[in-house]
Image (cartoon, rainbow, N blue to C red):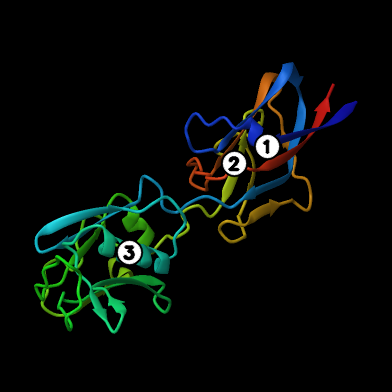
Amino acid sequence: MSQNKIIIINKNNLDNQNGLKNRYVYKFSNSQKLKGRISLSSIIMPYSTPNIYVNNCSFTIRYNNINTSIKIPTGFYTIPELNYYLQFSMKMTSNNIPYNIVNGIEIFFINILYNVSYYSVEIRVSPATLVGTQGKAGSIYTNNTPQIRFDDKLNEIVGFPINQFFPPSIQLVAYSTISKDYNIIPNLSPSNVYTVLCNIVNNNISIPTNIMYSFTPNTTYGSNINERPNTLLYVNINEGSYDKLVIELYDEFNQPLVILDENLVITLYLTLEE
């Protein structure tokens, strides 16, 4: 005979030793001998995996032979939002980086834009020339272009080579370049698939062998993911004794997901053989 069981996992089961909030541990009251199958019934969680994190958050602006390194706060950014933060940083970080104010409108000398036609990101840079009498206090307007470099792995997000300034040398005229010219596709959503791993699963035709389920977070950032398979997809339990059940969330490249909001509910169905 078989018995059907339900396990519900929530934020109280979070095991955050790695700081990523992707590991949840359900501890049994005593050791359990498990044999049978397990399935994910549902997972409800906020879509809170950032595309900018501590390992890909830096860029450098060079102007007048001075480098200014800037770190972007953790979050999920579109290209317009990255451009906004870039320009905000040019205003706030250093007097060395100039901009203009024309008729009350701020004019910046570096812009990054999304080019829909080419599925690319475009960088536009113009010479730092003071227009009128309103500019950034303390800045020197040299009539030369500033330069920008994407450090760490931020270059993979925007689609440009790492550790290279754009323009490569100071220019006296406007400069533009586009990521398609470097055969690099911008990757604004590095985590397109969520993979659910479970320590008691024996999925011997997959790598890794403890994959229980995978899904795409088809919602907007900050909204709830509500994943409910139309049909329960059972996988075998690796027969043995367990004192805990561990759920881990990884991406499609078997890398641990970064989750900012741990307010999730995971429901599991178990069909156990006696």
Identify which residue is drawn at 63% across, 43% down. 263
130 left or right of 70 in image: left
Q: Mark 2 or 1 closer to N-term? A: 1
How far is the residue under mark 3 from the one under mark 2? 30 Å
24 left or right of 8 in image: left
Name the one closer to the observer, 24 or 101: 101
Mark 2, residue position: 262
- The correct choice, above or below, for 116 with respect to 234 in the image is below
* Residue 205 visible: no
Mark 3, residue position: 88
Mark 1, residue position: 10
Label 2: element kind: loop
When asked about the image quadrant of residue 241, the answer is top right
Identify which residue is drawn at 27% across, 54% down. 70
When asked about the image quadrant of residue 131, the answer is bottom left
**Amino acid identity at mark 1:** Asn
Q: Mark 3 or 2 closer to N-term? A: 3
Q: What x and y, as percent, mark residue 101?
A: 25, 78
